[in-house]
């Protein structure tokens, strides 16, 4: 099977001295759902930012869709869809208008945009609400619109940074359904981060666990659990995660969900 991502010694040292990602190498196979797990501040979003060419690595590189991200960032970018950790939809615009705006960023012609908007709206089941402003959408619908925006240029590879954070279990399941659909029907490769272990366990073909900028382990959920079963009979993915990352509290992990919720409330209140 081909590798759609080959990270080679990726390193990010932020100004101010934080070594967020430390010489990380791994591959993602074409067509798989790849889970990238780690505690708060582990370096997940920073790794995604490098792979999507939003920031440059301090050293190392990655080959994405066969293209070196440090040499041909723009070309690599065209093969990638990216849905950030924070909601990016414009509340004052309708679902349709949000997508048209996104199509504009990729210089997709008006005629072609109409076809693709219809396509992605169908994909995320939002066709009937396309003419309504995003501010009238539920949390799950907004996230689906966010995902649709990431799909408008038909990427081969989609990055979803915490696609289900702060959503209720029903809505999380709904998002899983769409993620699976993208993989099964569209044959898209999906790279996702999540803090929900049940989600990673049921969705991901393979999982990497990163902590303090270093990849601790990488395998299928089943193999990761089996490897720990001598030590912890019936080990769950939670056990695997704690085993590789330790039990200590990290950064803002307690307040993260509430911070996310209040940020969204503020956005809505601002209108
Ligand atoms: N722009 C920046 N400048 C300086 N330091 C940063 C910057 N962005 C992130 N960091 C630091 O880099 C480290 C990794 O952050 P990153 O956002 O990649 O973590 P993460 O695994 O995505 O965490 P979370 O689960 O909270 O989203 C953290 O210590 C963070 O404080
Ligand atoms: Mg993050």
Image (cartoon, helix red, strand yellow):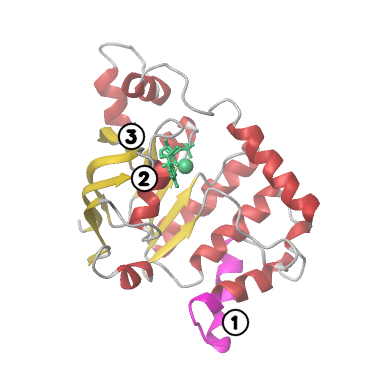
Dot 3: element = strand
Q: Is residue 24 left or right of residue 263?
A: left
Label 3 vs label 1: CA separation?
40 Å
Q: Is residue 67 magenta?
A: no
Q: Which residue is mark 1?
A: 114
Dot 1: element = helix
Question: In which image quadrant can residue 81 be found?
Answer: bottom left
Q: Which residue is mark 2?
A: 14
**Residue 207 coordinates in the image, percent (x, y):** 33, 38
Stretch in magenta: 103-124
Q: Is mark 3 within 8 Å of ligand 1?
A: yes
Q: Main secondary structure of the magenta part?
A: helix
**Residue 253 coordinates in the image, percent (x, y):** 53, 28
Question: In which image quadrant can residue 25 be found?
Answer: top left
The residue under the point 41% across, 16% down is 247
Q: Which residue is mark 3?
A: 210
Q: Nearer the viewer, mark 3 or mark 1?
A: 3
Q: Is mark 2 within 8 Å of ligand 1?
A: yes
**Which comes sooner in the sequence, label 2 or label 1?**
2
């Amino acid at each position: 099977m081909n590798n759609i991502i080959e990270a080679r010694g990726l390193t990010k040292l932020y100004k101010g001295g934080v070594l967020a990602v430390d010489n990380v190498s791994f591959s993602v196979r074409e067509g798989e759902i790849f889970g990238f797990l780690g505690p708060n501040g582990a370096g997940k979003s920073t790794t995604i930012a490098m792979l999507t060419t939003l920031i440059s690595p301090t050293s190392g590189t990655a080959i994405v869709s066969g293209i070196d991200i440090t040499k041909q960032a723009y070309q690599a970018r065209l093969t990638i869809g990216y849905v950030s950790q924070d909601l990016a939809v414009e509340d004052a615009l309708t679902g349709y208008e949000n997508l048209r705006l996104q199509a504009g960023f990729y210089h997709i012609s008006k005629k072609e945009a109409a076809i693709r908007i219809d396509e992605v709206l169908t994909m995320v089941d939002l066709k009937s609400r396309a003419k309504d402003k995003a501010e009238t959408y539920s949390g799950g619908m907004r996230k689906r619109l966010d995902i649709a925006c990431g799909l408008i240029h038909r990427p081969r590879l989609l990055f979803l940074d915490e696609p289900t954070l702060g959503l209720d279990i029903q809505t999380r399941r709904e998002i899983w359904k769409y993620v699976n659909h993208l993989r099964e029907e569209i044959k898209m490769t999906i790279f996702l981060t999540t803090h929900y272990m049940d989600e990673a366990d049921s969705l991901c073909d393979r999982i990497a666990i990163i902590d303090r900028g270093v990849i601790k382990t990488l395998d299928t959920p089943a193999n990761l659990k089996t490897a720990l079963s001598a030590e912890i009979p019936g080990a769950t993915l939670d056990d695997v995660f704690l085993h590789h990352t330790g039990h200590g509290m990290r950064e803002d992990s307690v307040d993260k969900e509430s911070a996310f919720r209040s940020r969204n409330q503020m956005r809505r209140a601002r209108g």
